[in-house]
Image (cartoon, grey):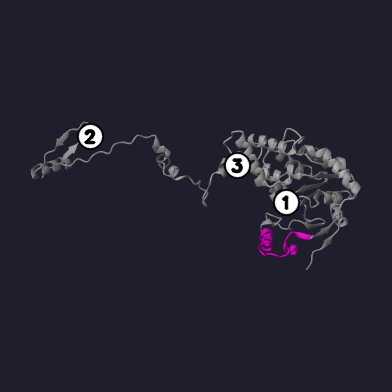
Amino acid sequence: MGLLIWNLKDLREVLEGCINNKFDAIVFIEGNRGLGKSTLAWKIVSGLNIPMPFHPKRDIVFTREEVLKHLSTKKRGVIWCDELINTAYNRDFYQEEQKTLLKALQMFRDSCNIFVGCIPKFVEMDNQIKRLCKIRITVVRRGLALIQTQMPSIYIADGWDIRNNQKIESKWTLRKGSKPKYTQLSTVRGILKFSDLSPHQREEYEAIKEEKRGRVFSEYQDVTLLGNPEKVFYQNLLEQIVAGKITNDMLETIASINGRDKEKVRNKLNNLLKEKGDKNRVRDYVMPKDKRERKDKLGFVIKSSEQAFSMPELVPPAMQDKEEKPMQEPVVRGAVVEEKKEHKKIVLPLLNDEDEEAMTQDILGFKG
């Protein structure tokens, strides 16, 4: 059985139906760089028949502040976050700003807006935001995308069935020359074909992006990348890393959306640290201490042999502060007992039978 072929009109009617029935619609468009995520987003939202029609300069947003402003003020319109990666990605979700964004998405759902976000990988987003997604569109190549929705279930925690679909997908990659069989994926509902933007649309989009995109990293960088972009990029990134404002996941994400190899970025940053005389490496700044420590299969930290056999760690803390009491030497009659403190020798006489009988009677309290 083949996949159902969708067109843009079909998809728009689904989104318009959500608005007309007083629901919101959160759509994520994922795919590698250059495959046409923004092109598809423009094609979708520009043809929507909704109370507040799409206006490019007003409705395309890049920063978290813009997203929050639109969510709190707009009703039955379009919010297109062209680089949602900087707004709701898993790398720094637990920052206060990310919590505010999640609350806003939930609080203003009755505003019935169509929220569209463009991201590299859907599976790397925070779980709570993934649950809010109504339609997931995966661009597999230019002009071709998969339409996905959650599985209708009461008991399954992961409606996107990510673990099962990952197993299915891995079979394609292990078999050389094997073509993807998207019909096997449990969340795929059809395939969508789309064309490129017109020259006028492309020109308008590029102008808006040029104007607004300088604020994409405004929360993480102090200056716009001017002059020597390569040099300023690494300098600003290094400053934020040393300041502890960037996590390991966030670093990989920044490298990804800038079309750079993450290992080359890391090596470049390590060289800059070395030039500045900093003995630390990038991992010392971007990874928490508990993740830097090596652990065994049971979760215990693997220590060096010198640490593992250190006596203070083997002695319980409650016993470390107590002074050891010397063991009392047993008294053996007829033998020589040495007292270590006074270095004296004491000789105790042996008891004969009569003395032992008398001592026994005294102890027991009667005489024979």
Q: Which of marks 3 and 1 is in front?
A: 3
- Residue drawn where x is 79% and y is 66% of the image: 2
Q: Residue furthest top?
A: 342
Please, what is the three-letter code of the amino acid marked with disc 2?
Lys
**SS for callout 1:** helix
Which residue matches tag 1?
122
Which residue matches tag 3?
283
**SS for callout 2:** loop
The answer to which of 144 and 368 lies nearer the viewer is 144
Number of other residues with Cα within 10 Å of mark 3, as a class: few under 14, some 14 to 19, many 20 or more:
some
320 vs 90: above or below: above
Kindly identify which numbered label has been placed on residue 340: 2
Q: Do the residues labelled 3 and 1 touch (CB within 8 Å)?
A: no
Is residue 97 at least partly visible in the picture?
yes
Q: Do the residues labelled 1 and 2 touch (CB within 8 Å)?
A: no
The earlier-in-sequence mark between 1 and 2 is 1
- Residue drawn where x is 12% and y is 43% of the image: 356
Q: Position of residue 194 (x, y in %)?
A: 85, 56
Q: Distance between the residues labelled 1 and 2?
A: 76 Å
Q: Nearer the viewer, mark 3 or mark 2?
A: 3
Q: Quadrant of residue 352?
A: top left
The earlier-in-sequence mark between 3 and 2 is 3
227 vs 149: above or below: above
Does the magenta-highlighted stretch encompass residue 172? yes
Q: Give the range drawn in magenta.
A: 164-189
The answer to which of 141 and 266 lies nearer the viewer is 266
Number of numbered labels in the structure image: 3
Please, what is the three-letter code of the amino acid marked with disc 3?
Arg
Left or right: where does residue 239 sit relative to residue 314? right
Please, what is the three-letter code of the amino acid marked with disc 1?
Phe
